[in-house]
Amino acid sequence: MGHIHLHVGDLKQAERFYNDILGFKTVAYYPQAAFMSTGGYHHHIAINTWQGAGAPTPPKNMVGLNGYTLVFPDEAARQRAIRLLEQSAVSVENKSDEYWTSDPAAI
């Protein structure tokens, strides 16, 4: 998979999570959408409010994306993201050296 598009209820809040904590950079911004990447790629993750700003988080049993894995370019970048996740108000769970979390939209 080259990239994913995620619906969020609050564009700026989600953008801060992916940029400030996980290390992505916004490469393009449109009203209702932001496109983020690492390494100068056109975009790895896009977030949008196309379903409506402030839309509620879907129920856990709804059909859709269950999760995805981020692979960091090196261990230092991975450790930085883990440290920032643990320092934030986000829940982080360590499962056999995999760290599970959710973004502000509960994705």
Image (tube, rainbow, N blue to C red):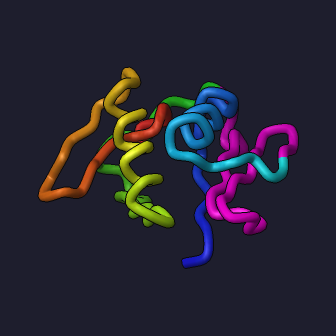
Q: How many callouts does the rendering have?
A: 0
Q: In the figure, 74 relative to 54: above or below?
A: below
Q: In the figure, 75 relative to 51: above or below?
A: below
As drawn, is 107 to the left or to the right of 19?
left
**Residue 103 position within the rendered picture, expressed as x and y whole percent measured from the top left:** 45, 38
**Residue 91 position within the rendered picture, expressed as x and y whole percent measured from the top left:** 29, 31
Seen at 27% across and 50% down, the residue is 99
As drawn, is 12 to the left or to the right of 58?
right
As for residue 32 lying within the magenta part, the answer is: yes
**Residue 34 position within the rendered picture, expressed as x and y whole percent measured from the top left:** 75, 46
Query: Front-most of 43 and 20?
Result: 20
Seen at 32% across and 31% down, the residue is 86
Determine the residue located farthest toward the top in the rendered image: 89
As drawn, is 65 to the left or to the right of 40?
left
As for residue 97 lying within the magenta part, the answer is: no
Query: Front-most of 102 and 18?
Result: 18
Determine the residue located farthest toward the left in the rendered image: 96
Which quarter of the rendered picture does the C terminus lie within?
top left
Determine the residue located farthest toward the front in the rendered image: 76
Q: Which residues are magenta?
A: 29-53
Q: Quadrant of residue 90?
A: top left
Q: Quadrant of residue 37?
A: bottom right
Determine the residue located farthest toward the bottom in the rendered image: 1
**Residue 84 position within the rendered picture, expressed as x and y whole percent measured from the top left:** 42, 33
Query: Front-most of 9 and 42?
Result: 42
Q: In the figure, 76 relative to 83: above or below?
A: below
Which quarter of the rendered picture does the N terminus lie within?
bottom right
Q: Quadrant of residue 18?
A: top right
